[in-house]
Image (cartoon, rainbow, N blue to C red):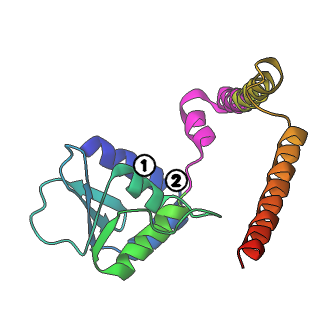
Amino acid sequence: MQTLQHFINQLLSQDPETLDELAGLSGKVIQVELLNTAQPAISLFIQDYGVRIETDHAAEADVLIRGTPLNLLAYLRPSGEGRPAVAGDLEIRGDLGLAQDFQRLMRKFEIDPEEQAARVLGDTLAHKAANLARMGADFLRQLKDKIELDLSEYALYETELLPERDEIERFNNSVDELRDDLERLKQRVYKLQI
């Protein structure tokens, strides 16, 4: 836990604005329980300089956040269009105001991976590595789009597994006409029975 604590505090020290706001919560304890893992509950003691992490804190925390790792990540991720403010089966007990303040701080906390790499590799290599990573991500996205397009064209034209759009429209129109004809036939039969 010492390594995780040091890493988190190192990151926080590079975002003075978030660190200052976090200091406003100094003295509070947030306990996090990760469900479906073998990890013990983690207690975050918020302090002026960052956080202290313990796994054997027996006293009651100010707030308890319990959920799966994915639920917790979704809870801490910035919310955007189509994403809920709270994720799935996340349980929050205790000081809900503190939980909201913590969530808000973590959502606006930004880590610049290029800046982190620059500390280790130097500015020039970090910039080149970041550009290479962006190019790789763009290439993979374009490759995925190309494969999807090729597979859909193969299924449509080569194997004829999928009908063309105009065939689907003709089929739908035929179904509509058949349904209308059937309804008219039902009306005629009904009139003949009377």
**Residue located 30% across and 80% down the image:** 95
Q: In the rendering, at what x and y percent does residue 13 appear?
A: 46, 55
**Residue located 25% across and 47% down the image:** 36
The reply to whether residue 20 is visible in this rendering is no
- Secondary structure that dominates the magenta span: helix
Q: Name the residue under label 2.
A: 14
Q: Depth check: give the residue in front, 22 or 55.
A: 55
Q: Residues within 10 Å of mark 2 (few under 14, many from 20)?
A: some
Give left or right: position of 147 versus 15: right
Residue 49: in magenta span: no
Q: Give the range drawn in magenta.
A: 110-137
Give left or right: position of 51 versus 116: left
State the mark number for residue 46: none
Q: Depth check: give the residue in front, 114 or 162.
A: 162
Quadrant placement of the N terminus? top left
Q: In the rendering, at what x and y percent does residue 81 appear?
A: 65, 64
Question: 137 above or below 51?
Answer: above
Identified by mark 1, the residue type is Gln
Q: Depth check: give the residue in front, 192 or 18.
A: 192
Answer with the quarter of the image where residue 29 lies. Answer: bottom left
Quadrant placement of the C terminus? bottom right
Q: Distance between the residues labelled 2 and 1?
A: 7 Å
Q: Mark 1 points at which residue?
A: 10
Identified by mark 2, the residue type is Gln
Q: Residue furthest left?
A: 58
- Please tell me whether mark 2 sits on a helix, a strand or a loop: loop
The reply to whether residue 149 is visible in this rendering is yes
Residue 116: in magenta span: yes
